[in-house]
Amino acid sequence: QVQLVESGGGLVQPGGSLRLSCAASGTIFSMNVMGWYRQAPGKARQVVARISSSGVTAYAESAKGRFSISRDNAKNTVYLQMNRLKPEDTAIYYCNRDPPIPNYWGQGTQVTVSS
């Protein structure tokens, strides 16, 4: 059984930083591209960043230069370092395989950027 548990969200002022973590259990992690996604109120969930099992990364335009995705294969954990946060980054952040498996969405972690 696969379980994805996101953590590290919170309230931060514009320009601040957060580091999100996603711990994966089961067989989803190894050999798979993993992604961070976000869903803002009233909007569709969208991919923010992705990372291959070998560490090749890709980012949405909105995340380039500010976010950094990484993974620790030994710990089955993927991270998202978010710097220079903006109010428009406010959303619930999720991790999943890329492309995502619908039944594997976790509860997400709320990120709120506000002064």
Image (cartoon, rainbow, N blue to C red):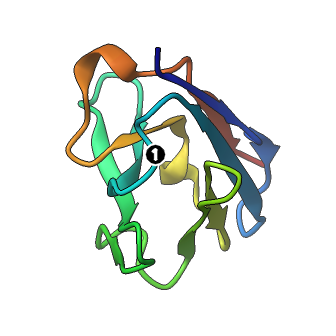
x 66%, y 73%: residue: 84
Relative to 107, say whether 38 is above or below. Answer: below
Asked if residue 60 lies left or right of residue 25, the reply is left
Q: Residue tagged by mark 1? A: 29
Q: Residues within 10 Å of mark 1 (few under 14, many from 20)?
A: many
Relative to 56, say whether 49 is above or below. Answer: above
Q: Residue furthest bottom?
A: 65
x 40%, y 67%: residue: 53
Asked if residue 42 lies left or right of residue 99, the reply is right
x 67%, y 72%: residue: 83
* Residue 74: image location, x then y, percent: 67, 58
> Residue 7 falls in which quadrant of the image?
top right
> Residue 8 falls in which quadrant of the image?
top right
* Residue 34: image location, x then y, percent: 39, 53
x 45%, y 77%: residue: 55
Relative to 66, say whether 75 is above or below. Answer: above
Asked if residue 92 lies left or right of residue 76, the reply is left
Relative to 50, say whether 68 is above or below. Answer: below
